[in-house]
Image: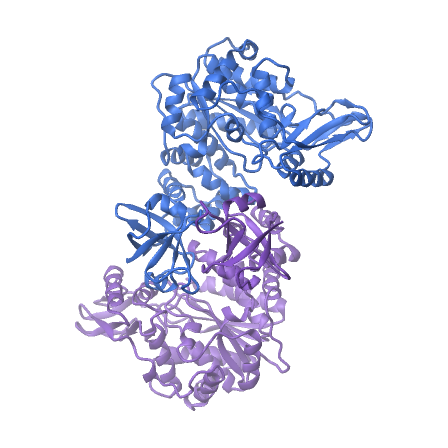
Chain colours: A blue, B purple
């Protein structure tokens, strides 16, 4: 144990910079873990070491911002630092690497040490790769879900049912939450919805909602807003609900892996932690979606339902059409404007309205608000009657936004370019991944005006010279970038005859 | 591509600190990779991001030391920074995670990107865990070895044979290289020996050698010293010979994994890169050694020999007794003094002399310097005649040390404590791992005087009150630490009768 004087460094990371002589005294090398103690507050962080001593005098410890959120130093305090031993989790991670089955306690230890920042990037990655290669059985997935819930905040409502929904990702333009939640709440149900920001997409629901209202709330605030107006749409990252996932995803993303068990647990932990009784899961199926075949989608649906059973939640899943973007817009302002227009009763793309009504309708049926088979019609009625819009205004207002917001307040970016049909024919392919790449190149989700408006969709006939899609950007160099990607990726294919239309026969296959 | 002004930060790490607004413009988040370009020099590094702007103004990039060794900024230069895409390796790492077989080209890409710092810790860990779980076959191990050689420096000698030796780790006090190399060179053979520093041990050969001569040399210097006097004992880390291993080990070590294929490749790449024709590998077998059974040792030996065949090197392996420390000393000065005394013809532990002579003797036989069966005797002769000592003096001198050094120049630490036998009986167990932990707690290998001197060894009879071992430390608080560990770990067990003596029947089982 060594006492050093704390100095706060302006680096957004979990770490502490040590003078190399102090590091030697503590007995750590660059990259080792140390425990830091500021009176009652303690945390574990990665040690960085100075090369010379120009940046940090001996006797001083440079505490990084993320670490300092736990220590709350102002600078100048004496802090205690010691090398920490091997985290307890390592043996359990090793057990999984050796094809063992993890117990509840072992799983809890791993997840706790991920949340506490005790594990290093290499160790977290080892855990994820171990679960990816050797798999998790349903017991282990249940333990993982419970561990993720236990290491974060939970909501607890006096009255029930609580409804929640989730869409498996991978399909651009999937702004249905902005319609589904107000419909469900307008039907008199409670829906405390936590959403994510885009990691690989052109805009997560939290990014979209943030264009019209604040989204960073604590779990307590989410609960009280839901009690007040029936629902809210917030950014999950700020709530500290099932927070392990936010760290895990950082290591899954570069490897492009999403181990089955991790994905199930990640979705269901968030539902369980908000106290949901009824959960609808939207599973888009398509060549460029996360789930590529109906069979795979059905298997995933069964696993969600089994996990729900084990946790005491009723789950229904809908396999939805994931071959093309949902609606006609991709990108923050474009998507939010599209959703607001539909809420206000203006014309909107049928695919978006239908999908939202189907998902919301399943929830209404599950909750017993309507007879089986009447959910979609009832949801459509709540939408067209303006009741969902009135509810959305309340939700925007309770989150601190302006309820009078309209589509006109959310303009697309000034810089735009329209791609026209090179020949007469049918749109035979829209490559979701390519469209997302182009939207991101244009600046989405950071630049709110950036995105893509689709004039035509898959299966539609176009004449030579007809506009197919328009790229929007807030900055001209971003538009150039997006055009370069567009030329490279050719996201929309027009051919002379309809050779490849995918039948809509898995449009809504609810499973229960 | 964004142009920023470079500023060198005194942090010993691979990274660049960006103002958060610049990071946004570049399009990277905390932890993403960026390419940095300073005229012709370029490198990839992890981006860190400021929380506010107190540490770094917008327009300035804070380049860390390891990254700056490639960019060679003095500060104030304009550098170009851009986000880099997904490394090519990721697909190959994923292939291994999915049980695929890696080609030479894929393996080469992975190793190149590890050496280049293109891969992140999480990605390197994923690769290692993938090879740990799914294994590498002998083709893949050969590709890995060749890739490790190709990404570093190589030696090339005009005259042959070149001899090399390696000891698999895990046994404390294994200072045999300090005897084996001078014996081999005294016999007229060339031996350019690269050694490692301790990672988990109480002293690697490079740590030991550094107590009597500089050890940090380039590959070119190692070659010219070997050409001049016949051999050298240097720190491999400075030579840039098969450098991937130094990075890989950083991620294996915390997980306590050493995937079979990685270990084979790591050892053999270093031998291949120095141009070795003849290689002797010492495989200690013991309960607390890396290899715990003779059967396992024989299998490992066969793999080393097969890999040697594929690379055109003749390999012989000796399974050696790894149940107890080699000789009577653990720790830098204690071990070096023990080796020097033996070279000078003073009395020394039989186990150390025998083992050194056996390993060197195999090399003499392989090189045809003596008849089969006469290697050990010939090696012993070179040792007792003072020829090995004369050669060691030349090696020390060519490396820039004082050839007149004696054991008296390497005193044990002033602070010491002797543990006496609590009862009369036999030493039935010496726990290698516990002894290493205690030596490290006492300050080894950083404090040169720190370590353990063993008065008794396994199987010996002791009377109540006889000294069993003495702990030495350079600093009194380190001695206290070591005593605490000693009380906790009980590294030596004395019992009233000999219940558990491990027969020496696998003492030298050369395989060829």
Q: Quadrant of the C terminus of chain B?
A: bottom right
| Residue B178, picture quadrant | bottom left
Number of residue marks: 0
Q: For this rendering, which residue is in front, B251 or B503? A: B251
Q: For this rendering, which residue is in front, B262 or B42? A: B42
Q: For this rendering, which residue is in front, B165 or B68? A: B68
Query: Is any part of residue A241 visible from this angle?
Result: no
Where residue B419 appears, as percent x and y from the top left, is: 21, 70
Where residue B437 appears, as percent x and y from the top left, is: 32, 63
- A430, above or below A6, in the image: above
Query: Is any part of residue A55 visible from this angle?
Result: yes
Question: Residue at left 49%, top 13%?
Answer: A390
Q: For this rendering, which residue is in front, A330 or B316? A: A330
- Does residue A474 appear to the left or right of B215 in the view shown? right
Where residue A144 appears, as percent x and y from the top left, is: 42, 36
Question: Residue at left 18%, top 68%?
Answer: B422
| Residue A23, picture quadrant | bottom left
- A231, above or below A48, in the image: above
Where residue A342 appears, as percent x and y from the top left, is: 59, 17
- Does residue A328 appear to the left or right of B304 in the view shown? right
- B428, above or below A282, in the image: below
| Residue A510, picture quadrant | top right
- B403, above or below A414, in the image: below
């Amino acid at each position: 144990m060594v006492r050093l004087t704390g100095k706060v460094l302006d680096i957004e990371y979990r770490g502490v910079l040590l003078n190399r002589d102090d590091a030697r005294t503590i007995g750590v090398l660059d990259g080792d873990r140390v425990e830091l103690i500021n009176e009652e507050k303690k945390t574990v962080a990665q040690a960085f070491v100075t090369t010379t001593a120009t940046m940090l005098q001996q006797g001083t410890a440079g505490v990084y911002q993320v670490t300092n959120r736990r220590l709350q130093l102002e600078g100048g305090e004496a802090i205690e630092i010691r090398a920490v031993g091997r985290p307890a989790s390592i043996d359990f991670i090793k057990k999984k690497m050796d094809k063992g089955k993890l117990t509840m306690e072992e799983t809890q230890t791993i997840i706790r040490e991920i949340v506490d920042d005790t594990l290093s990037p290499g160790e977290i990655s080892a855990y994820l790769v171990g679960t990816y290669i050797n798999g998790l059985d349903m017991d282990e997935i249940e333990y993982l879900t419970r561990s993720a819930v236990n290491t974060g905040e939970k909501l607890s409502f006096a009255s029930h049912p609580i409804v929640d929904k989730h869409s498996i990702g991978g399909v651009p333009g999937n702004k249905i939450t902005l319609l589904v939640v107000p419909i469900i709440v307008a039907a008199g149900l409670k829906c405390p919805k936590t959403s994510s920001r885009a990691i690989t997409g052109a805009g997560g629901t939290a990014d979209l909602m943030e264009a019209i209202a604040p989204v960073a709330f604590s779990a307590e605030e989410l609960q009280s807003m839901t009690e007040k107006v029936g629902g809210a749409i917030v950014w999950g990252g700020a709530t500290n609900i099932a927070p392990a996932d936010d760290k895990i995803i950082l290591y899954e993303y570069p490897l492009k892996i999403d181990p089955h068990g991790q994905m199930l647990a990640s979705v269901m932990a968030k539902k369980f932690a908000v106290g949901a009784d009824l959960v609808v899961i939207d599973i888009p199926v398509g060549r460029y979606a996360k789930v590529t075949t109906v069979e795979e989608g059905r298997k995933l649906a069964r696993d969600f339902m089994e996990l729900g059973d084990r946790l005491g939640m009723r789950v229904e899943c809908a396999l939805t059409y994931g071959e093309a973007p949902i609606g006609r817009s991709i990108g923050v302002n474009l998507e939010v404007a599209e959703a607001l227009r539909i809420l206000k009763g203006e014309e909107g793309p049928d695919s978006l309205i239908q999908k939202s009504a189907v998902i919301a309708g399943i929830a209404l049926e599950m909750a017993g608000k309507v007879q089986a088979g009447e959910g979609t019609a009832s949801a459509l009625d709540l939408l067209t009657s303006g009741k969902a819009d009135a509810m959305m205004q309340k939700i925007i207002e309770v989150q601190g936004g302006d309820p009078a917001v309209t589509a006109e307040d959310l303009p697309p970016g000034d810089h735009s370019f329209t791609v026209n049909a090179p020949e007469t024919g049918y749109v035979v392919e829209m490559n979701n991944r390519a469209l997302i790449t182009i939207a991101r190149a244009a600046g989405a989700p950071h630049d709110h005006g950036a995105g893509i408006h689709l004039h035509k969709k898959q299966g539609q006939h176009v004449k030579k010279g007809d506009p197919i899609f328009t790229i929007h950007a807030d900055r001209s160099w971003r538009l150039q970038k997006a055009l370069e990607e567009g030329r490279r990726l050719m996201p929309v294919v027009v051919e002379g005859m309809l050779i490849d239309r995918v039948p809509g026969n898995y449009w809504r296959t609810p499973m229960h």
